[in-house]
Image (spheres, grey):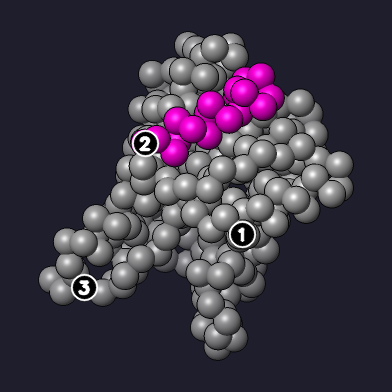
Amino acid sequence: MTLRDKTIIVTGASSGIGAAAARLFAASGANVVLGARREAELSAVAEAIRATGGRAAFLPGDVTLAGHAEALVELAEREFGGLDGAFDNAGIVGALGPVAEMSTEAWDDVIATNLTAAFLSARAQIPALIRRGGGAIVFTSSFVGTTNGGLPGMSAYAAAKAGLTGLARTLAMEHGGDGIRVTTLLPGGTLTAQAGNDPDFHSFVAGRHALRRLARPEEIAAVAAFLLSDAASFVTGAPILADGGVSTSF
């Protein structure tokens, strides 16, 4: 499995799974183009990659804006000559609570960041991948809304993440003939900032996983690297679980 000399966009790259993926992809030989809202953190990830001999460009911005997705593609083509893949990873959990008590604004924010942003990213990336002769797109989805019986209070998140699976399947069929593969990656509980720092909560969530622990971001990044590599050349349209067996407990 190698990403040598491939150019890959990573969104949500300033921390967590996105930052781990950026570092791993670069260490595997890829040129990485990084996007996220937080400029200081994004710059730090890029500088750390460059300090170890990797190749990274970055552009802060909002994934819910079509212009940012287009600008990341333009940056990839300008800096590295083309685009070979994308890890469209940006997402938020958002406000939790029953549907009857959820504001339209809270719903829209989660759908825009988790689902509409993936559509905008793919829309900008696909023409560039076609110009390159093919490539791969990986969306970060979740076991929530796709494999379990439903988690109370997470309706917007579940709807958005389930929507990514449908989007990926359709894109896979539409562009398989162009040599473009599209998959969704479904992590289980992962030790990121969104998981917080409460050890009791971590212990509770870990206990729902068959492996009895949460994932490290690097473990999820490794699966994304596989899906973007030529080793996954016959994998498309599929939701790929990397959930530590949490889906088996529901």
Residue type marked 1: Ala
Q: Which numbered tag is attached to residue 40?
A: 1
- Give, as a single range, the part of the protein colored magenta: 66-84
Query: Residue at image x 49%, y 32%?
Result: 71
Query: Comparing marks 1 and 3, which lies closer to the viewer?
Result: 1
Query: Comparing marks 2 and 3, which lies closer to the viewer?
Result: 2
Residue 3 colored in magenta in the image:
no
Q: Which residue is mark 3?
A: 98
Q: How dense is the environment of label 1, judged by Cα within 10 Å: few (below 14), some, or many (20 and up)? A: few
Q: CA distance from mark 1 to mark 2?
A: 22 Å
Give percent across and percent down for residue 167: 36, 35
Query: Residue at image x 44%, y 54%?
Result: 91
Residue type marked 2: Ala
Helix, strand or loop at mark 2: helix
Q: Which numbered tag is attached to residue 66?
A: 2
Q: Quadrant of the N terminus?
A: top right
Q: CA distance from mark 2 to mark 3?
A: 30 Å
Give percent across and percent down for residue 143: 45, 56
